[in-house]
Amino acid sequence: MATPRATARTPGRRLQAEAKRTAILDAAEALFVSDGYELTSVDAISARAGVSKRTVYDHFGDKQTLFRSVLERTNDAVVTTARTAIDEELVDGRDIRDALLGFARRVTTEMFPASDYVTFRRLSSQAPVAPRLPEAVRDQPERLMEERFAKYAADGQLQLTDARRAMQHFVALTMRLALDVIDEDLDGTVGRAQILDILADGVDVFLRAYRGPRY
């Protein structure tokens, strides 16, 4: 297997090399999404990026490493979006129902339709033919939510013993269910109001389970 070649570079050469690397990633992402991992060749990627095949190998070593790098880049964008939504919606002092519903709405109506998330799903769906990211990397948004749910429990706002399981229940009742409905809506008959109703119902079911009968 080829390995990326490291050489000493002046600042100008480093900028040029970085520009080529970005061009390769952009070209690879477009082709992996449109043609799939198996049908995409390094020749096609180099031609689309406007660089030599040797340059692709110098930067990434092989097609597997390049695909994983594309996947890591889109995953990083998704994680950043999820972290921002958590930090801005699941805030201290906010009514927990409003916070959870605001977070679910934001992820479903803003993150799910975003190009980074759509690309990430399309790339991830090519496994097991294509390489996958390590589980710890793939689960970063879930772990961020798990940490916030654990804090809600510590503050007495949720009654739970397993923050991860509670997070999984929340996702299943809200965003996962909404995403399934969206994916199955081939004729576009499901409107925004119906999706928001699904999220509101899911948040209420979750809180009845994790705040006790008084909710």
Image: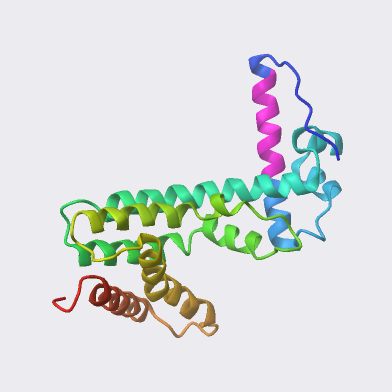
The colour scheme applied to this rendered structure is: rainbow
Nearest the eye: 108 or 190:
108
Query: As drawn, which residue projects farthest toward the front?
Result: 161
Nearest the eye: 56 or 138:
138
Q: Is residue 158 magenta?
A: no
| Image height of 14 relative to 26, above or below | above
Q: Where are the magenta residues, as a range?
A: 13-25
- Residue at 71% across / 33% down in the picture? 20
Q: Position of residue 128 (x, y in %)?
A: 73, 63
Residue 151 appears in the figure: yes
Q: Is residue 24 magenta?
A: yes
| Image height of 153 relative to 54, above or below | below
- Residue at 28% across / 78% down in the picture? 205
Residue 51 appears in the figure: no
| Image height of 107 relative to 7, above or below | below
Nearest the eye: 22 or 85:
85
Q: Position of residue 16 (x, y in %)?
A: 69, 25
Q: Position of residue 133 (x, y in %)?
A: 63, 52
Q: In screen coordinates, is 130 left or right of 99? A: right
Which SS does the magenta portion mostly show?
Answer: helix
| Image height of 178 relative to 129, above or below | below
Quadrant location of the C terminus in the rendered image: bottom left
Q: Residue 89, located in which quarter of the rendered image?
A: bottom left
Q: Position of residue 50 (x, y in %)?
A: 78, 39
**Figure disc tally:** 0
Q: In screen coordinates, is 56 left or right of 194? A: right
Quadrant location of the N terminus in the rendered image: top right
- Residue at 27% across / 55% down in the picture? 90
